[in-house]
Image (tube, rainbow, N blue to C red):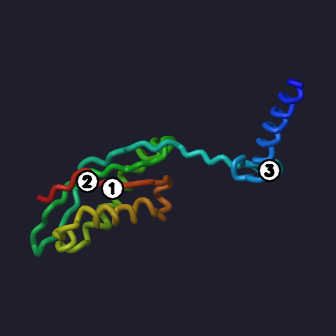
Amino acid sequence: MMKVIVGVVLGCALLGVGGAALFKPELLPFMDLTEANTVQYHEPLIEVTLHDVLIPINVNRRQKLLLTNLSLFINKSERDIFEQHESKIKHEVLSEFSVKPESYFMSKNFISVFQSDLEAILVDNKDENINFKVKEVLVTKAVYQ
């Protein structure tokens, strides 16, 4: 009699677990075996710094300077490519910002506007001369002289 009771309890327990899995399929995620599993690998990012980028600001007949340091986040495998193209990146920044009016540099939210413009240039890069992808740009120093 004891064996029957234990058997019934075990049977109900096993059936209950199986029944719960049948009636609540979100508890156990089932995958289609014919579907290909795609694993997305995100390569680690590293921070590289562009030191002492001088941007000339033309004020009437005088010229002032903006000294900046920029941190760029790129894929680890592209570090060597970055070192080859560092001068091209500085040139892109200089050519873009040296023609801006003085009012651009004097606004209250200059750093955030400057950073978003840098991201537009470097992150959304369409230049065929620079063949690596910048993921993020941070302005770490901006000194107006």
Mark 3 is on which residue type?
Leu
Dot 2: within a 10 Å radius of its alpha carbon, few (fewer than 14), some, or many (20 or more) residues? some
Q: Give me the disc on residue 53.
A: 2
Q: Which quadrant would residue 103 be assigned to in this image?
A: bottom left
Which numbered disc, 1 or 3, marks the residue that appears first in the sequence?
Answer: 3
The answer for how far apart the CA atoms under marks 3 and 2 are is 64 Å
Q: Residue furthest front?
A: 1
Q: Secondary structure at mark 1?
A: helix
Q: Name the foreground residue: 114 vs 87.
A: 114
Q: Around disc 3, counting alpha carbons within 10 Å, would you say few (fewer than 14), some (14 to 19), or many (20 or more)? A: few
**Mark before the other along the chain sequence, 2 or 1:** 2
**Residue indicated by mark 1:** 90
Question: Residue 113: image x %, image y %?
Answer: 28, 67
Q: Position of residue 135 (x, y in %)?
A: 45, 54
Determine whether 37 is above or below 123 in the image. Answer: above
**Quadrant including the C terminus:** bottom left
Report the disc number at residue 22: 3
Vertical placement of 91 versus 85: above or below? below
Residue drawn 85% across and 30% down?
A: 5
Residue 62: give x, y in percent of width and height.
10, 69
Q: Where's residue 58, x and y in %? A: 16, 70
Q: Alpha carbon of mark 1 to alpha carbon of mark 3: how far?
A: 61 Å
Residue type at mark 2?
A: Val
